[in-house]
Image: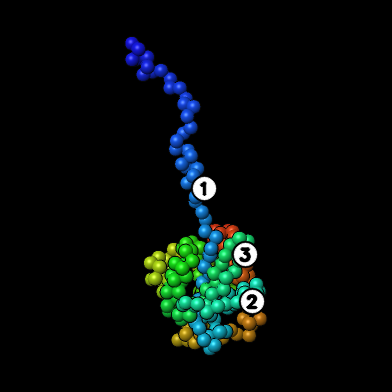
């Protein structure tokens, strides 16, 4: 009957350490969260586009750079400024590929700086939102925007964060192109500085607080 006793005998707890536990701890120690972010403001290069609605992405990055005394340097596929804030490094990118090829610049700088998709924020104009309105999303459709179309095609996914800045749709039938590539109205110019200030805070929040908290804090403002 000794064999039967041995089967039902309670197992003594081993004093030996669990060999799996140190391995799990070691894995956790080696897991690192990237503190590098790519902020791609979309627009078209050229003096004729500087103050147009379609160039709000460039304008927001220019505002942040001026506010933080940063300088843009001409680099491959765009102008780049490096911004350090609270232990994070933000690469502010203004693609020089024109809007329709924005994806090339975004992909190049993601690869060059080893920036994960979730740390990329694309800033663009949106006709479907009232002027100055903010909409931040972790993913979504291109909404007919050529810059977003290019990024989606190049990256092979629509699952990247985007920050849409409303430019409204107050144009007559057949005048969409002229409106988008037109300059801001006088009333819009008056209100723009306050909205640019808010946009700069959104960029910093994205890198420090994350997409979820940023959406909660700023969407609808």
Q: Nearer the viewer, mark 1 or mark 3?
A: 1
Where is residue 24 shown, x and y percent of the image? 47, 42
At 65% from the left edge and 74% from the top edge, which residue is drawn? 69
Q: CA distance from mark 1 to mark 2?
A: 38 Å
Residue 67: image quadrant is bottom right
Give the total number of marks visible in the rendering. 3
Query: Looking at the image, can residue 216 be seen?
Result: no
Q: Secondary structure at mark 1?
A: helix
Residue 73: image quadrant is bottom right
Q: Which residue is mark 1?
A: 29
Mark 1 crowd level (few <14, some 14–19, many ≥20, 10 Å Cα):
few
Query: Looking at the image, can residue 199 be seen?
Result: yes
Q: Which residue is mark 3?
A: 85
Of labels 3 and 2, earlier in sequence is 2
**Which residue is more in the foreground, 177 or 156?**
156
Q: Which residue is mark 2?
A: 66
At 57% from the left edge and 73% from the top edge, which residue is drawn? 81
Where is residue 107 shown, x and y percent of the image? 43, 70
Considering every residue shown, the one lying at the far bottom of the view is 48
Q: Indicate the quadrant containing the N terminus: top left, top right, bottom left or bottom right.
A: top left
Where is residue 180 shown, x and y percent of the image? 51, 83
**Which residue is more in the foreground, 134 or 70?**
70
Q: Are marks 1 and 2 in contact (CB under 8 Å)?
A: no
Q: Indicate the quadrant containing the C terminus: top left, top right, bottom left or bottom right.
A: bottom right
At 45% from the left edge and 86% from the top edge, which residue is drawn? 174
Residue 199 located left or right of residue 40: right
Asked which colour scheme the image uses, the reply is rainbow
Mark 2 crowd level (few <14, some 14–19, many ≥20, 10 Å Cα):
few
Considering every residue shown, the one lying at the far front of the view is 16
Considering every residue shown, the one lying at the far top of the view is 1
Q: Secondary structure at mark 3?
A: strand
């Amino acid at each position: 009957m000794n064999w039967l006793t041995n089967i039902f005998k309670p197992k003594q707890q081993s004093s030996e350490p669990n060999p799996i536990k140190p391995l799990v701890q070691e894995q956790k120690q080696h897991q690192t969260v990237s503190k590098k972010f790519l902020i791609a403001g979309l627009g078209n290069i050229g003096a004729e586009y500087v103050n147009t609605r379609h160039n709000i992405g460039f304008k927001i990055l220019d505002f942040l750079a001026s506010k933080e005394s940063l300088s843009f340097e001409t680099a491959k596929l765009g102008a780049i400024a490096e911004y350090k804030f609270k232990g994070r490094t933000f690469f502010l990118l203004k693609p020089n590929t024109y809007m329709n090829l924005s994806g090339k610049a975004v992909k190049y700088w993601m690869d060059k700086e080893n920036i994960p998709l979730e740390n990329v924020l694309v800033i663009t104009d949106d006709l479907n939102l009232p002027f100055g309105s903010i909409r931040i999303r972790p993913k979504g459709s291109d909404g007919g925007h050529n810059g977003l179309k290019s990024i989606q095609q190049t990256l092979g996914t629509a699952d990247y964060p985007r920050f849409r800045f409303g430019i409204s749709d107050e144009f007559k039938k057949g005048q969409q192109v002229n409106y988008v590539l037109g300059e801001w109205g006088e009333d819009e110019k008056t209100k723009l500085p306050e909205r640019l200030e808010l946009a700069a805070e959104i960029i910093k929040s994205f890198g420090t607080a994350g997409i979820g908290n940023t959406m909660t804090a700023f969407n609808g403002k």
